[in-house]
Amino acid sequence: EVQLVESGGGLVQAGGSLKLSCAASGFTSGDHGMGWFRQAPGKGQEWVSCKSSRDGSIYYADSVKGRFTISSDNAENTVYLQMNSLKPEDTAIYFCALVVPKCGSTDGYWGRGTQVSVSS
């Protein structure tokens, strides 16, 4: 059974930083994308960032480019999201996702989410 466990959410003032972590277990090797999407109150899901296992290519939503950085520790099946210069509009539940076979796919697994709240 594939499990994704997120950590690192919290409350921060605008301009602050947070780092999210996601540990994956139970996934057998194979092409996949691993990253984060978010859902703000009253809004739809938005992919924030994703890293492809095949070639290491990385996707960022325009809304977070230059502020967020995704990284991974393949040996530990862990992916991180460093979030800097946070804005109130970044407030959302952030979900870790592992999609197959690559970023952009809607087939895969996701965690329970971690709340990120940014105060103005």
Image (cartoon, rainbow, N blue to C red):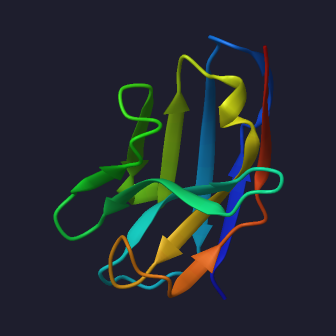
The answer to whether any part of residue 74 appears in the image is: yes
Compare residues 67 and 62 and report the one nearer the observer: 62
Quadrant containing the C terminus is top right
Quarter residue 74 falls in: bottom left
Q: Is residue 77 above or below residue 16?
A: below
Q: Is residue 107 above or below residue 73?
A: below
Please state the horizontal and vertical placement of residue 66, each as a whole percent of the image.
36, 26
Please state the horizontal and vertical placement of residue 45, each as a whole percent of the image.
64, 63
Q: Is residue 40 above or below residue 14?
A: below
Residue found 69% across the figure and 13% down from its top = 14
Residue found 62% across the figure and 11% down from its top = 15
Q: How many marks?
A: 0
The answer to whether any part of residue 26 appears in the image is: no
Residue found 39% across the figure and 42% down from its top = 62
Quarter residue 12 falls in: top right
Please state the horizontal and vertical placement of residue 44, each as a whole percent of the image.
68, 63
Instruction: List the single residue furthest toward the left.
Output: 55
Quadrant containing the N terminus is bottom right
Is 40 placed left or right of 36 in the picture? right
Is 83 placed left or right of 33 in the picture? right
Is 29 placed left or right of 95 in the picture? left
Compare residues 12 and 76 and report the one nearer the observer: 12
Residue found 28% across the figure and 67% down from its top = 53
Instruction: List the single residue furthest toward the front.
Output: 42
Is 109 placed left or right of 107 in the picture? right
Q: Is residue 31 above or below residue 48?
A: below
Please state the horizontal and vertical placement of residue 61, each as a whole percent of the image.
42, 47
